[in-house]
Amino acid sequence: MDLQKIIDKKDWASKYMIDEITHIIKTFEKRDPGSKGELQSLEYMKETLEKECGCDPELTKIEEFKENPGSFFGWIYFTITFVLLAVAVYFFFPLASAILIAVGLGIVLLEFGFYKKCVDRFFPEKTGHNLTVVRKPAGEVKRRLVFNGHADAAWEWPVNYKLGGVGFEGHAIICGVGAIFYLVASIIYIAHFGLKGVAINAEATFGEWYIKAALIGLVFVPFLVGLYWMWNEDRIVDGANDNLTGCYMGIAVLKALEDEGIQLENTELAVVNCGSEEAGLRGSKAWAEAHKGEWQDVPTFFFSYDTIYDPKYLMVNYRDLNGTVKSDKDVSDLFLEAAQAVDVPVTKGWVPPLGGATDNAAFCQGGFRSTGITGLNHKLEDYYHTRRDTYDNMNPEGLANCFAATVKALEMFDDGAKQ
């Protein structure tokens, strides 16, 4: 079906998204993972999709899941405490020092590197929510396109707010180097001096050098201590760009179709807006588990949007979750080709190490065909996860371009491309 009429509404769509996002931020409570505000925003989206976007109320639902959202950054308390203890015992018991650092690094690798549940049991349990809404076609369902975003907002990152991404990432890297420095030093100590620091055929000069090196390593300690304040649990950002833009990309498409009286013949459309992405993809992981084996009847593609902001950085992410998860190539190629077809600047990229993840990773891991669409510089800017992510700091051109590319991708998919 020719959807050029909808593509031409990209400026309207951009304004619609900004107006709706502004309404949510001004009207409802803060939307930290598992919060009342997160649920309020999903309930509002549900009502909008049913009443204004032609979605079937009988196929609409908000589902609950249990989570421990504080654990995603709570690894800091474990890892940094272990590393600081390792520095303290290093001079007396190098084996204990090495074990403490290894365990601490293992926790951060599991919790933040791979988004696995590692220390969740030590943090309060909350109830998160996911929204699923379906718009039926006129005839038989032969294919399905799903639009995804996440409704929750992040806890503020104070260092990124004060120093920007270079300062934030630099701080984290320095801490990592410090931990590895002491781990390597502990291993060398054990190799040359024995498990308890007793010299075994070692020259005294080596011991003197080793102690001096360890003392120099104390320069890392202030940075390690500072990492306790990597996130501010008491300040929840507005999350206008990250990620109400993702939630409203699909809603705007369905709204435009409904306003123009367009019903696709054989393509079913769905919106899956999740909660608690900022808590380690807890919402999308719960959705993928709850719906495992579903939507396998026809070709089903997921477009997962996250932080649609700067038009210079509109990107299709062919890998996700710190580069460890592969997106579906056909789905990724479809969006890339659609953007190019409507002259929207787009790049082929990935979510790199230290870049985190989007809900796309959870869908891919759950067996769904999905790709991630982002519109941000992966070299973090100072609005990302800070109080600057507000409704008056959005980019109409970035939203309009992504909308146009999305509608073109829908048109191509409806015509049978990439199935």
Image (cartoon, grey):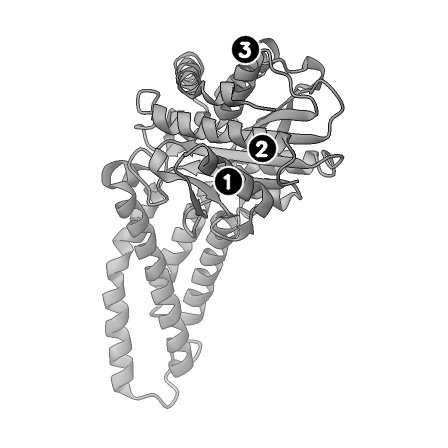
Along the horizontal axis of the image, is 220 left or right of 109? left
Q: Are marks 2 and 1 in contact (CB under 8 Å)?
A: yes
Which residue in the structure is indicated by mark 3?
A: 259
| In this rendering, the label closer to the viewer, 3 or 1 | 1
Residue kind at label 1, given as amino acid type:
Glu
On screen, residue 360 above or below 112: above
Name the residue tied to disc 1.
337
Mark identifier at residue 248: none
Q: Quadrant of residue 134?
A: top right
SS of the residue at dot 1? helix
| 395 over 82 or under it: above or below | above
**Residue 385 percent coordinates (x, y):** 36, 34
Q: Nearer the viewer, residue 209 or 374?
A: 374
Q: Residues within 10 Å of mark 2 (few under 14, many from 20)?
A: some
Q: Is residue 129 left or right of residue 295?
A: left
- Residue 168 versus residue 360: which sits nearer the camera? 360
In this view of the protein, can residue 185 be seen by the observer?
Answer: yes
